[in-house]
Image (cartoon, coloured by chain):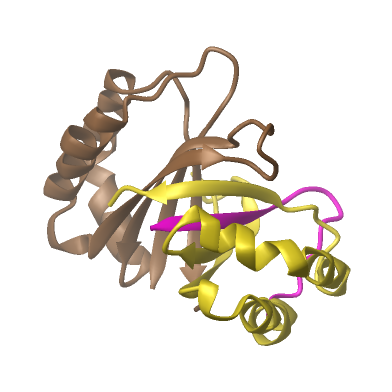
Chain colours: A brown, B yellow
């Protein structure tokens, strides 16, 4: 299983509209990607290592695919629309990680 | 559901022994934390945004709890043993994020 992880790093002046992300952006991504996308998950950052530490990431999104080629096929024709929607919910440029699910 | 995420950021000279992490470290964490821990997951970083981009994180580990108090109870008496095992598989100081699983 392949997981594409989008990490929205926290920082001064960074904003993130979780309601839009959950109700509009991720459903849009799922609709555009169709059957290539198995499912998605969303984390909301609520804390760091210690109670007074900043939250490292305001949000982390996960897209699951059976294989890397499915992601490439899904993102290719849709990248522009997906990236174009990002300013509607955040001023953060997300870090994109491709992972293999080990366990 | 609460998720504690450990992110092992990539960088010059950074190393990560996935076999040890999967076969020794995470089972140790699970044994120490007992029933407070629901389950855990492991990602292995294999790529970034573009084929020639560096991998942002060599590994990401996830610990799932029903509630924050369960994590606090689980980590309190075991933090020293868990942190003490980290040099056995990596020279990376992991970033720790506490998240709420939104979806």
Compared with B71, B30 (above or below) is below
Instruction: Report if residue A34 is visible in the image.
Output: yes
Compared with A70, A33 (above or below) is above
Q: Which of these two is toward me, A29 or B22?
A: B22
Q: How many marks?
A: 0
Instruction: Report if residue B50 is visible in the image.
Output: no
Residue B18 percent coordinates (x, y): 69, 76
Compared with A96, B17 (above or below) is below
Q: Is residue B88 left or right of residue A94?
A: right
Q: Which of these two is toward me, B46 or B103?
A: B103
Q: Residue at x 52, y 73 (%)?
A: B37
Q: Residue at x 32, y 19 (%)?
A: A87
Q: State the residue lying farthest toward the top.
A: A13
Residue A18 percent coordinates (x, y): 31, 31
Q: Is residue B94 left or right of residue A79?
A: right
Is residue B90 shown in magenta?
A: no
Q: State the residue lying farthest toward the bottom.
A: B23
Q: Residue at x 54, y 48 (%)?
A: B98
Residue B65 percent coordinates (x, y): 47, 64
Quarter of the figure with the N terminus of chain A: bottom left
Q: Residue at x 39, y 25 (%)?
A: A16
Residue A67 percent coordinates (x, y): 35, 70
Residue B14 lies in quadrant: bottom right
* First to last magenta residue range: B1-18
Residue A88 lies in quadrant: top left
């Amino acid at each position: 299983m392949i997981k594409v992880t989008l990490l929205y790093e926290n920082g001064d002046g960074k904003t993130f509209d979780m309601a839009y992300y959950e109700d509009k952006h991720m459903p849009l991504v799922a609709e555009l990607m169709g059957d290539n996308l198995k499912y998605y998950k969303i984390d909301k950052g609520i804390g760091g290592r210690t109670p007074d530490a900043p939250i490292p990431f305001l949000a982390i999104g996960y897209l699951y695919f059976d294989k890397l080629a499915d992601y490439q096929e899904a993102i290719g024709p849709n990248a522009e629309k997906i990236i174009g929607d990002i300013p509607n919910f955040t001023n953060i440029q997300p870090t994109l990680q491709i992972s293999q699910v080990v366990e």
